[in-house]
Amino acid sequence: MHNPTSVQLQAALQGNFDAEMKAGLSRVQSALQKAIFEYAQETQTKWRQDILASGLSNAQKLAKTVRVKRYPNEGMNPAAQVYSTFPLIQRAFEQGEVIRSRDGNWLTIPNPDVWPGGRVRRQGGRGVRERESSVGIAERRFGPLRFIYNPHGASMLVTDARRSRTKAGTFRYASATATRRGNVETIVVFFLVKQARLPRMLRGKVIRDRAARNADASIERLFARHFEQAAAGPALLGSSQSE
């Protein structure tokens, strides 16, 4: 005959063990998810910091294109993705891409002494001016441009312009009066080249490759920390082991 007390004790022990197993599994799943998400966040931060330190004129905006997607999924299968919404720009400055004109002619590079930041800004509303070329914008602002060919380097588009008296470093359209009085100077508006190689200003590929190499060890370290932080008592399931 079975001892009723023994049966009750066995049932109680069995129930506690199941509860502990369930709680332990929940801790493991939560710690794994936090570890993977935190590692993805660390990678995103390093990638963004590299862009911000690059010196690119639009570094702030470009850094924001580095995003993280988190996939909690179910059980032991969480995942995260670190990516850029502008991968072509990223790769161009990571690999030092060679840029060529679409029509095989000249690349028009704005002279930063004339165009602040080295960029021709389009103004006005929708319509013709939105589709206006950089040369068209320059001629509307300064007047006709002249081509100067240089067989040993960059050719140029130049014009005669009047230096602003009120805003340093700014040039304006030279009126007939200014031209007659000789208050004009020849400025280089654009440099013309057949092709240009972008400088390697971004290290995103290095950061991503390093993150991939260190993923197993780093996630295991983060997992152990989150697992211990979640523990209310001694860990029943032990530490994780990589396969």
Image: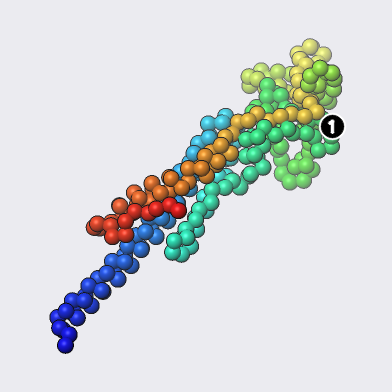
Q: Is residue 50 above or below residue 220?
A: above
Q: Is residue 234 left or right of residue 184?
A: left
- Horizontal side, residue 9 vs residue 99: left or right: left
In the displayed structure, 203 sits above or below 218; it is above
Front-most of 241 and 187?
Answer: 241
The quadrant holding residue 198 is: top right
Residue, x 53% and y 31% (percent of image)? 53
Q: Nearer the viewer, residue 214 or 65?
A: 214
Task: Give coordinates of residue 13: x percent, y percent.
Answer: 22, 72
The way the protein has been coloured in the rendering is: rainbow
What's the residue type where badge 1 is placed?
Answer: Asn
Which residue is most to the top? 182
**Residue farthest front in this picture:** 1
Residue holding disc 1: 105
Q: Position of residue 181 (x, y in %)?
A: 79, 12
Q: Quadrant of the N terminus?
A: bottom left
Horizontal side of 193 relative to 23 (left or right) equals right
Q: Is residue 173 visible?
A: no
Task: Estimate the x, y position of residue 199 in percent, counting from the top left.
Answer: 65, 29
Residue at 46% x, 43% y is 42
Q: Quadrant of residue 30?
A: bottom left
Q: Residue at x 82, y 24 (%)?
A: 145
Identity of the residue drawn at 59% across and 34% down: 202
Q: Position of residue 205 (x, y in %)?
A: 58, 39
Of 221 and 10, the residue lying toward us: 10
Tell me where residue 100 sits by quadrant.
top right
Count of numbered circles on the image: 1
